[in-house]
Image (cartoon, rainbow, N blue to C red):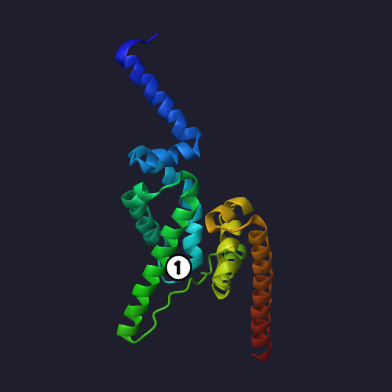
Amino acid sequence: MVTGTFGRRIWKNRRRALRLDGSSEGVVESAIRRDPEAIRALWREHRGWVAGVLLAHKSSEVDLEDLLQEVALTVVRRIHEVQDAGAIRGWLRTVALNAARADGRRRSRRRRLDGAYRGVHPVASGGVDDAREEAVRLLELTRLLDEKYREPLILRCVRGMSYRQIGEAMGLPETTVETRIARGRRMLRELFARQERRAQAGEDRS
């Protein structure tokens, strides 16, 4: 059995590791105290759904990884400002929204100065299978939805979050989240069907 100062240090580190691995709230509390290891653990845990929020709100021409890096940097710099560990999802969502919207404003100003719109839209290559191509088309169509439908739909369908988790992040009741996702899916199906009809009509005329 290990005893003394060295032994106490080992036990302290072991308890800390268990706390970081097994308790999300423990991770947040340690991160708020600016513990580097806890901040890394926090980011690993939440990075996926934060990417979903960015997908829902970013401009199509913005690289997702660039925005994720910007959010991660803000987390490192400002995590100590969080007052309630239980409100971390809402805080992270606000950071993500601010990053996406600030980038959108910067690009809007740049477009006005340049006098031209430079949109970049993904185009499926011949080597991409049909399922992949359809997924890209559907993701692009979500940009036509209102934000209140687009964000929960992406968090649910792309990031696999539960209604409860989405509600916590967006500050909404689960029932509202479920309703918005159902309506978003319906609108998306209608948009997709309309696009298919237009494509078919174009083929018939040619």
**Vertical placement of 141 versus 160: above or below?**
below
Tell me where residue 171 appears, x and y as whole percent.
55, 57
**Vertical placement of 140 versus 88: above or below?**
below
Q: Is residue 92 left or right of residue 176?
A: left
Locate the C terminus and report the quarter of the image it occupies: bottom right
> Residue at 60% across / 62% down in the picture?
153
Q: Is residue 179 left or right of residue 87?
A: right
Q: Is residue 93 left or right of residue 114?
A: right
Tell me where residue 80 appears, x and y as whole percent.
35, 47
Q: Amino acid at mark 1?
A: Lys
Q: Is residue 7 left or right of residue 52?
A: left
In the picture, residue 26 is in which quadrant? top left
Q: Number of marks in the image?
A: 1
Graded by Cα atoms within 10 Å as few (under 14), some (14 to 19) or many (20 or more), the crowding at tag 1 reads many
Q: Nearer the viewer, residue 127 or 41?
A: 41
Task: Label 1, secondary structure: give it.
Answer: loop
In the picture, residue 176 is in which quadrant? bottom right
Locate the N terminus and report the quarter of the image it occupies: top left
**Vertical placement of 192 versus 113: above or below?**
above
Tell me where residue 150 appears, x and y as whole percent.
57, 67
> Residue at 47% across / 74% down in the picture?
121
Tell me where residue 129 appears, x and y as whole percent.
58, 63
Instruction: Decide if residue 162 is in sight here.
Output: no
Residue of label 1 = 58
